[in-house]
Image (spheres, rainbow, N blue to C red):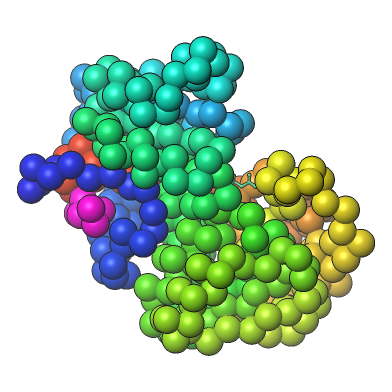
């Protein structure tokens, strides 16, 4: 860290301004050579992370977050220690506390990416770690690096102009990617939000308060049809987070109102995009994938460059290094 101070990335509330994000995004641009995601991307490291070790400690399933962090670290020239089912294969299974595990792992690695089912786990880890901790998702709380790559995708695919309108659709209550994304979107002046969810799955109070405090324009809709009529630039879809519902899987008769179909796509603006943090289930049928507005696979591909920028900022203090703590 440039100022010698240890930084962690635990919450999007650490980011104070859109210009702070711009620094990080310019770095991500450099890593991917300004190209749209493609197999030809070369991800040139600006500084080598040779000799640095990233530990990925995942207590919940993951495809994109863990593998794209590992890819980012390797592309930067560094190496990876990984435990993909830490609940079963780490000393957690013997009753070790998260704090003790982090104390130990932080003496083996130069940074830790942690995914954990308990809200607040990343902050607890950061409090005892001697190396930077990156929150790879803590229960239904936050997922800041997903939000960074979501905003980066919006910037690359449609641009972020005053009045950008983003429809957030689905399980707003439990979706940590949406909670973090709201935190970043509110840094952009004039952003408008359309909140689209069934009654029982509305945003947590804390997120609603943040929206009010920022004075952002906001509409609530109880179907995708209503949301599309608001002419959004971005439709951000999420799955039902069944594993986080209190009494097991919720059966929602109204759920089809929150699943995208060909008729919504017909009404959607030609220059809009559809995003999804993935995995997608029935809410975005595979038949829609060939529509060029469906940008979710670009979105996941951008994750490597964005995570290279995050790691590089933590290691070398590149632009965007001031992650706020
Ligand atoms: C998300 C997550 O884990 O919160 N996935 C991801 O990291 N890309 C979304 C989800 O699981 O629904």
Q: Residue furthest right?
A: 253
Pick the front one: 259 or 216: 216
Please determine whether, in this image, residue 139 is positioned above or below residue 29.
above
Image quarter of the N terminus: top left
Residue 183, by quadrant, is: bottom left
Q: Position of residue 281 (x, y in %)?
A: 78, 47
Q: Is residue 237 left or right of residue 190?
A: right
In percent of the image, x 47 and y 14: which residue is there? Answer: 91
Please determine whether, in this image, residue 254 is positioned above or below residue 68.
below
Residue 80, by quadrant, is: top left
Pick the front one: 209 or 191: 209
Is any atom of residue 80 visible in this view? no
Magenta stretch in the rendered image: 319-325
User: What secondary structure predominates along the stretch shown in magenta?
Assistant: loop
Pick the front one: 105 or 121: 121
Please determine whether, in this image, residue 237 is positioned above or below residue 50.
below
Q: Position of residue 70 (x, y in %)?
A: 42, 28
Q: Is residue 226 left or right of residue 192?
A: right
Q: Position of residue 278 (x, y in %)?
A: 64, 46
Please determine whether, in this image, residue 215 is positioned above or below residue 118.
below
In percent of the image, x 35 and y 23: which residue is there? Answer: 100
Q: Is residue 190 magenta?
A: no
Q: Residue furthest left?
A: 3
In percent of the image, x 53 and y 40: which residue is there? Answer: 118
Is any atom of residue 227 visible in this view? yes
Q: Position of residue 30 (x, y in %)?
A: 29, 49
In percent of the image, x 53 and y 60: which residue is there? Answer: 179
Q: Quadrant of ligand 1?
A: top right
């Amino acid at each position: 860290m440039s100022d010698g101070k240890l930084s962690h990335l635990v919450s999007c509330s650490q980011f104070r301004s859109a210009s702070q994000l711009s620094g990080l995004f310019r770095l991500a641009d450099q890593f991917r050579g300004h190209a749209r995601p493609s197999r030809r991307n070369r991800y040139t490291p600006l500084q080598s992370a040779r000799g640095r070790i990233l530990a990925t400690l995942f207590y919940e399933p993951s495809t994109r977050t863990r593998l794209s962090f590992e890819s980012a670290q390797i592309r930067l020239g560094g190496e990876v220690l990984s435990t993909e089912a830490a609940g079963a294969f780490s000393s957690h299974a013997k009753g070790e506390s998260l704090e003790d595990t982090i104390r130990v792992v932080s003496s083996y690695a130069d940074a830790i990416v942690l995914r954990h089912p308990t809200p607040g786990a990343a902050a607890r880890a950061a409090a005892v770690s001697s190396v930077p901790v990156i929150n790879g998702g803590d229960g239904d709380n936050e997922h800041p690096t997903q939000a960074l790559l979501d905003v980066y995708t919006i910037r690359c695919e449609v641009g972020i102009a005053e009045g950008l309108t983003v429809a957030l659709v689905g399980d707003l209550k439990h979706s940590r990617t949406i909670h973090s994304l709201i935190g970043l979107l509110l840094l952009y002046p004039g952003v408008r939000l359309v909140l689209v969810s069934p009654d029982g799955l509305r945003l947590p109070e804390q997120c609603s308060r943040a929206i009010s405090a920022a004075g952002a324009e906001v509409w609530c809709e109880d179907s995708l049809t209503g949301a599309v009529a608001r002419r959004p630039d971005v439709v951000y879809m999420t799955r039902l987070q069944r594993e986080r519902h209190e009494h097991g899987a919720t059966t929602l008769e109204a759920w089809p109102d929150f699943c995208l179909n060909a008729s919504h796509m017909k009404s959607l603006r030609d220059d809009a995009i559809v995003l999804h943090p993935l995995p997608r289930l029935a809410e975005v049928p595979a038949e829609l994938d060939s529509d060029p507005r469906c940008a979710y696979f670009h979105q996941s591909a951008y994750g490597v460059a964005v995570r290279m920028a995050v790691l590089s900022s933590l290691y070398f203090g590149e632009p965007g290094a001031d992650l706020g703590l």
